[in-house]
Amino acid sequence: MRFHDLRHTAATLMLQQGIHPKIVQECLGHSDISMTLNTYSHVLPSMQEDAAEKMDELLKPIDVSGELKHLSESRPQYPGEIQSNN
């Protein structure tokens, strides 16, 4: 195994562990992040899948109907306000 192989393995493992590519770039001494991303793009598909799963989780609808009902029941009524019976 050559030193270059160890370097490549280390960079691949760092990216797979979710270490930001900018940090990997600095560890490898690449002058431009595009060099790092182009060289290790084979790692990115799994990272893209992870990102998509995280976004899916973040964007799941949250049921707030109970909280809204509680807020509407607990707020004070103002003079002249029409009371809703919903």
Image (tube, rainbow, N blue to C red):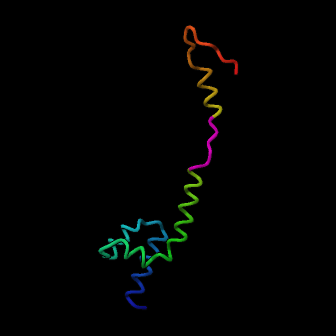
User: Magenta residues, as a range?
Assistant: 59-64
Which residue: 44% across, 71% down? 14
Which quadrant is the C terminus positioned in?
Answer: top right
Q: Residue 15, position in %: x, y?
A: 45, 71
Q: Along the line of sight, which residue is nearer the eye, 13 or 21?
A: 21
How many numbered circles does the render carry?
0
Which of the two residues, 82 or 27, is positioned nearer the viewer here? 82
The residue closer to the viewer here, 27 or 76, is 76
- Give me the residue at 37% from left, 88% from top: 3
Q: Residue at x 56, y 19 (%)?
A: 75
User: Residue lying farthest bottom?
Assistant: 1
Q: Quadrant of the N terminus?
A: bottom left
Residue 47 located left or right of residue 83 = left
Question: Would residue 71 be counted in the magenta stretch?
Answer: no
Residue 28 % position (x, y): 34, 76
Residue at position x 52%, y 67% in the image = 47
The quadrant holding residue 85 is: top right
* Residue 11, quarter of picture: bottom left
Q: As displayed, is residue 51 above or below residue 10?
A: above
In the current view of this chain or complex, which residue is farthest to the right? 86
Relative to 26, does residue 59 appear above or below in the rendering? Answer: above
Please name the predominant secondary structure of the magenta segment in the image: loop
Q: Residue furthest top?
A: 79
**Residue 63 in magenta?**
yes
Residue 6 coordinates in the image, percent (x, y): 41, 84
Tell whether 62 sits left or right of 37.
right
